[in-house]
Each structure stands twice: as C-alpha cells, then as structure tokens.
Image (tube, helix red, strand yellow):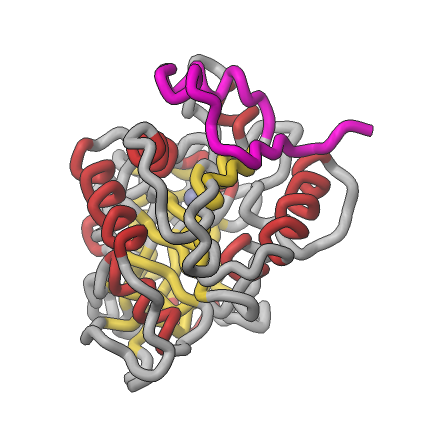
Amino acid sequence: MADAHLYLPDGLPEALLEAEDLEVLRALRRPTLIRLPGSGQQPPRAISALLHGDEVTGLQAVLKILRRRRTYPFDLYVLLGNVPAALADHGFAHRYLDDQEDFNRVWGGSGDTPLRQAAAEILDRLRGCGLESLVDVHNNTGDNPFYAIVTRRRPEVLNLATLFTTTLLYWDLGANTLMEALEDECASIAVECGLPGRPESLAFAVDALRRYLGEPALRADRVVRDHELLGDLRKVVVREGVRFRFGGGVSDDIDLALAADADVHNFVEVPAGHTLGMVRPGAPVPVRATDATGTDVTDRYFAVRDGALVTTVAATPVMMTRTVEAARKDCLFYLAGGLPDAG
Ligand SMILES: [Zn+2]
C-alpha cells in the first residue's frame, strides 16, 4: 500500500514555490513532510502547519519562508498536516472532515485510519533524524493573545517558546498531539497565532518563525527570558444534547446562549460570579469541566444562578472559541490557573 503521507526529501519543487497556496496543496493532496536540506552544522529543526485544516496562518507563513529559498545551518523539516481537510469546500473551511479524526489527536497512538498511518510514518521520520526542536503552528477559533503551549518546563523548551511570545500555557492534558509525541526527544512547542486570515496573525507567525530559524542553538542551562506561565488546565465542554449558540437569548430550541463576546476574557482572570451565558429555566448546568486525570470537576467551577451560567471561583478562561463547530469538535474553552515559576 502507498504511504499515507508524501515525503519530499529535497525541498518543495521549484514549480510549487511559485504557486498559490491552494495550488500547492492541490499538488500535494495528502499530509506532506518536506525536508529542506541545510549545511548540517546544527541538528535539524521542524515546523508543522495545518494539523487543523482551517488554520491557514501556519501554511502562509511557512510558504513565505520557503519562497525565500534560504539555506540554514540545519536541515529544516516542514510538515503540512491535514491537506485533504484544508482543500475541501474551496479551502480552509474545516478543522477536519466528517470522515476523519482531529489530526492533532492521533500522534503516538495506534490504529489504521489514513491519518493515524500518516502520523505514524511522519513520527518515525522525525524521531529518526535527531531533531533539536519542533514548532507546531496553529490558529485559534476565538480572540486570544498570541501565546505558546509547552508540555515540559525544561530551559530549552521555555527558551524556544519565548522566541515566539512570553505568554505561555503549560499543557498537561495528554491529548496525543504532535508536540506531546516529541516532547521527550526535542524541545517541542505549539504556537497559537490568533484568528486565521488576519494580517496581524500572519505577521506574528512570520516574524517569530524567522527569529526561530535565525537563532543559534537553544540554551539548555538556564531560562533566558522572563515570561508568564499559566497552567493547571480544566477542559470545559458543552454537555451532549445541549442546544447552544453565541449571542442572543434562550428559547424553546436554545438551552444555552453564550455571551457573544465570551472570548474577550481569554487570558484575563475573571472573578467568581462571572456570567458566561444564559440558561433555559430549570435546565441543569449545561457544561462539563474535567481535570488532567479526566475527573469531573464541574461543581467546583460552575453553577446556574438566576438563569445564568456563572463561574464559582476566580479563574482565567483561555482558548474560548466563538464558533459552535469548534466547541463541538474540540471544546468550549479551558480554565487556567497560575503556576509557580519554573526558574
Ligand atoms: Zn489548531
């Protein structure tokens, strides 16, 4: 059987460097790992984009960088992830397709779906090449500041993340992401570049990737830059069967009306009693919160009071989405707390 991914060991063909973004993807058709050979003085680095098919910023940024035709002191691996999802319906409309899984939840797991096979093949190549670091580029589905996600607090990981931004989130939820699959072999992070399609999102990604590619070896002996580190995440989902929307009020066919601008509080601590939305009279708490062990902790954080869904402790919402599709396919948001300084 053919490989589930496409491997281009000598860079992107010249004709594709001249092509439009979607034309590039049409030529590739499947998850693609590109190796840009370097001069070999330093261990390889990697950038991943499009693990979610609707997150265009990473693709635009890496193509912009590849089109400069630079040679780096290291081999540069570029992964273009869920190409089929990115191509469907005129482009960049789907996180993943209805007959697929989320491509950022299948790394290091088992199974034989096309995406799981592609993930296993790509992981084999990345684990076999002695990577120094990996940066996985994403967009958010709600308004957030630019931030980086780390799963380890080693100095080289924090030094990599703070090349991008000093707003950091410590992720310990174990979601079979690409970044987690490589966390013990190299410095690996995810970078969240705001909403897709915005010029400032692309400018941030390009700037930060250029800093990354121009940076000498990452220091492993000390953390170089001061930073904010949020963590202690609780995942919050809308309960199955709850009919919800953003904006408007509750009605016979809407059980939960979330505030239209709920995402303005991302990365801002809100006090106990903060209203997330309105709930149909008599309905139970319409969301469910779980901690890193999967334990249901809803009652510690949420209640329904006077028809409103409110928080019951001070906490910081992060990654709040503003689309029903993202809330269904992933989650509504996470609640974060502070972490002691890693030093
Ligand atoms: Zn993403």
Query: Where does residue 83 sit, x and y in percent of width and height?
Result: 53, 28
The residue positioned 38% from the left and 15% from the top of the image is 19
Q: Image quadrant of residue 149?
A: bottom left
Query: Where does residue 155 sit, x and y in percent of width and height?
Result: 36, 77
Going by the image, does 24 lie left or right of 169?
right
Residue farthest along the right direction in this orientation = 1
Pick whichever, 324 or 273, lies toward us: 324
Residue 189 versus residue 119 in the image, above or below: below
Is residue 186 visible in the rendered image? The answer is yes
Query: Where does residue 229 sit, x and y in percent of width and height?
Result: 29, 72
Query: Where does residue 117 sit, x and y in percent of width and height?
Result: 72, 41
Residue 107 versus residue 271 in the image, above or below: above
Q: Image quadrant of residue 315?
A: bottom left
The residue positioned 38% from the left and 33% from the top of the image is 59
From the image, which quarter does the N terminus lie in? top right
Pick whichever, 47 or 54, lies toward us: 47
Residue 19 versus residue 144 in the image, above or below: above
From the image, which quarter does the C terminus lie in? bottom left
Looking at the rendering, the stretch of residues picked out in magenta corresponds to 1-30
